[in-house]
């Protein structure tokens, strides 16, 4: 696993995504999205660089919503990766 954009954000936790017998730890990264031009949510760059980005300036409730929806997207991504 490789996480990108670490210099601009900080890892605030991980979400475990289980697909079949595989469990993937997806890092959650907080950074000022407005300043970076990046979007919040799940991201994958290639097959090995992935994570969830949240806006460090957003309220906690909004961050949780982004993490929840991004976790669904991560599960879809890994389902395609492992089951195809």
Image (tube, helix red, strand yellow):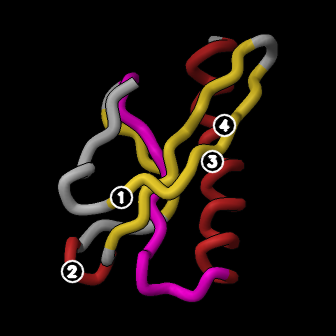
Marks 4 & 3, CB-CB < 8 Å contact: yes
In percent of the image, x 66 and y 49: which residue is there?
71
- Place of residue 58 in the rendered image (x, y in percent of width and height, measured from the top left): 50, 85
The kind of secondary structure element at disc 2 is helix
Q: Give the CA distance from mark 4 to mark 1.
A: 25 Å
Residues rendered magenta in the picture: 47-60
Q: Nearer the viewer, mark 4 or mark 1?
A: 1
Q: Using residue 84 as the reference point, say whether residue 47 is left or right of it.
A: left
- Where is 54 relative to 28, above or below? below
- The residue indicated by pointer 4 is 76
Whether residue 15 sits left or right of residue 8 in the image: it is right
In this picture, residue 61 sits left or right of residue 49: right
Residue 32 position by quadrant: bottom left
Mark nearer the N terminus (1 vs 3):
1
Disc 2: CA contacts within 10 A as few (<14), some (14-19) or many (>=20): few
- How far is mark 1 from mark 3, CA to CA? 21 Å
Q: Could you say whether the residue bearing mark 1 is in a helix, strand or loop?
A: strand
Residue annotated with mark 2: 35
């Amino acid at each position: 696993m490789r996480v990108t954009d670490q210099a601009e954000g900080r890892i605030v936790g991980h979400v475990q995504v289980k697909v079949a017998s595989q469990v993937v730890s997806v890092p959650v990264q907080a950074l000022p999205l407005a300043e970076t031009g990046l979007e919040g949510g799940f991201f994958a760059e290639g097959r090995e660089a992935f994570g969830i980005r949240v806006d460090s300036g957003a309220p906690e409730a909004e961050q949780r919503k982004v993490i929840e929806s991004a976790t669904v997207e991560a599960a879809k991504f890994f389902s395609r990766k492992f089951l195809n």
